[in-house]
């Protein structure tokens, strides 16, 4: 399986705003390669739940200590899923003392949403 040339963490999302929704025109190859990584990350049910918890957290961020108890899987497995979300560019992480806090990246979420908007 091939990896995209650019990581979403360093991808200029404003430069991709030129892309029309999928129902209007084909997506450029560069955007498809990078955005597909975000869709792939959301394709896992645990990651989708984590993303929902992070994006809907009061104040826009949530501690890993609040995410872990919501699942019946180990802490290292949660960390693996959070790493995948971070590597895809969907979230950022900030360490504070012994805890890590996660924030959703709204620009990427809007871009993913716009791609799927059939009414645009």
Image (cartoon, rainbow, N blue to C red):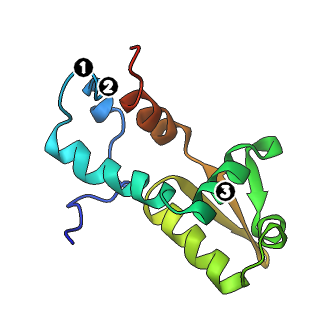
Judge whether residue 9 can be spotted in this image: no
Residue at numbered disc 1: 24
Residue 49, disc: 3
Q: Which residue does the image show at 41% across and 14% down from the upper left?
A: 119
Residue at numbered disc 2: 21
**Does 29 appear above or below 85?**
above
Judge whether residue 23 can be spotted in this image: yes
Q: Few, some or many C-alpha atoms within 10 Å of disc 3 (few <14, some 14-19, many ≥20)?
A: some
- In depth, the one of 12 and 85 nearer the eye is 85
Q: Which residue does the image show at 24% across and 46% down from the upper left?
A: 32
**Does 117 appear above or below 15?**
above
- Residue 73 screen position, x and y as percent: 72, 80
Q: Given contact means CB atoms under 8 Å apart, are the residues at marks 2 and 1 in contact?
A: yes
Question: Of helix, strand and loop, which one carries label 2?
Answer: loop
**Does 18 appear above or below 73?**
above
Q: Residue furthest top?
A: 119
Q: Quadrant of the C terminus?
A: top left
- Residue 1 screen position, x and y as percent: 21, 72
């Amino acid at each position: 399986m091939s990896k995209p040339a650019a990581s979403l963490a360093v991808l200029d999302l404003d430069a991709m705003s030129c892309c029309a929704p999928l129902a209007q025109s084909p997506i450029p190859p560069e955007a498809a390669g990078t955005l597909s990584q975000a869709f792939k990350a959301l394709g896992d049910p645990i990651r989708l739940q984590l993303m929902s918890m992070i994006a809907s957290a009061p104040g826009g961020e949530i501690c890993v200590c609040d995410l872990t108890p919501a699942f019946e899987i180990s802490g290292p497995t949660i960390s693996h899923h959070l790493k995948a979300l971070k590597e895809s560019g969907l979230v950022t992480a900030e360490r504070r003392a012994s805890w890590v806090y996660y924030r959703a990246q709204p620009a990427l979420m809007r871009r993913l949403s716009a791609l799927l908007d059939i009414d645009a």
